[in-house]
Image: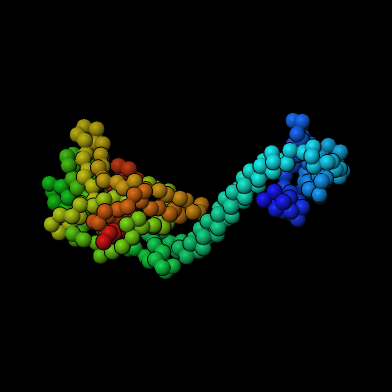
Amino acid sequence: MRKLVLFLLLALPLAAANLKLYLKDGGFHMVREYQVEGDRVKFYSIERSDWEEMPASLVDLKRTETEAGERKAVAEEEAKQVADEQELLKQNRAEIRKIPTDPGLYRLENNELRIFNEIESTVHNDKGRQALRIISPLPVVTGKSTLEVQGEHSANVVTDDRPEFFLQLATQEDFAIFKLTSRKGIRLVENITVVPVTKEVVEEPVKVQIFQKELSDGGLFKIWPQEPLEKGEYAVVEYTPAKMNQKIWDFRIE
């Protein structure tokens, strides 16, 4: 085994960053590289900027080889991380090219673009239901209301329990994935309370914890759940807190 190591050192000189050639007396030479040639060790001295040699019997090759191996392993791991990061950037650029610049919600499924249509929502209170697009911003009516979308189930079926979405914002606003509750004929997006006197709007959605990554300065984000989603109704929602200006794209996990 030792002969094999010496052969490898001879065939492939260590020419990475400067390293220590340890001596058996406890000292070391700082070298750029070294080679074992029979009973001699030839090395390039950093201090004297020249090739030198000494008897191999004076050199602690085991310690030198161990440290050199550890440094090589670290360098290889760093190189792998750089390569992985470059590959990820390459993949991100490829994904970005597939996503339209128009505001909206998109998915890539089998490398094909899927476009989600924004759906209309209504506010339901004691006075009935009104389309949010018509009444936005929310009239100051104290008490409790609900924000709803029509239909008990979304037509947009997603089979991946940790789906990745691409959200292109029109303006810099908040966004999230909401868990919707199916009721007769509708799905509840969130409860709303307008506080008496202060008229403060309090929204109570059921949010899914998500990861998000900004892919461009133009407001393109990639979002996905931190944990697998249970079967049921969901929506990606773009909004400004307390302004009732939601944009909603619904989907169903099956």
Q: Nearer the viewer, residue 80 or 245?
A: 80
User: Residue at horizontal 26%, vertical 46%?
Assistant: 206
Q: Is residue 149 above or below residue 28?
A: below
| Residue 16 placement (x, y as % from top left) | 72, 47
Left or right of 47 on screen, residue 242: left
Q: Looking at this rendering, what residue extends furthest in the top direction?
A: 26
Q: Where is residue 223 drawn, in percent x and y? A: 40, 53
Q: Relative to 200, is 42 on the left or the right? A: right
Q: Name the one closer to the observer, 217 or 63.
A: 63
Of 56 and 97, the residue lying toward us = 56
Residue 131 screen position, x and y as percent: 22, 55
Q: Is residue 242 above or below residue 214?
A: above
Question: Along the line of sight, which residue is nearer the eye, 96 or 130?
Answer: 96
> Looking at the image, which residue is at 26% across and 50% down?
179
Q: Quadrant of residue 62?
A: top right
Q: Quadrant of residue 53?
A: top right
Q: Residue placed at 39% from the left, 62% from the top?
A: 107
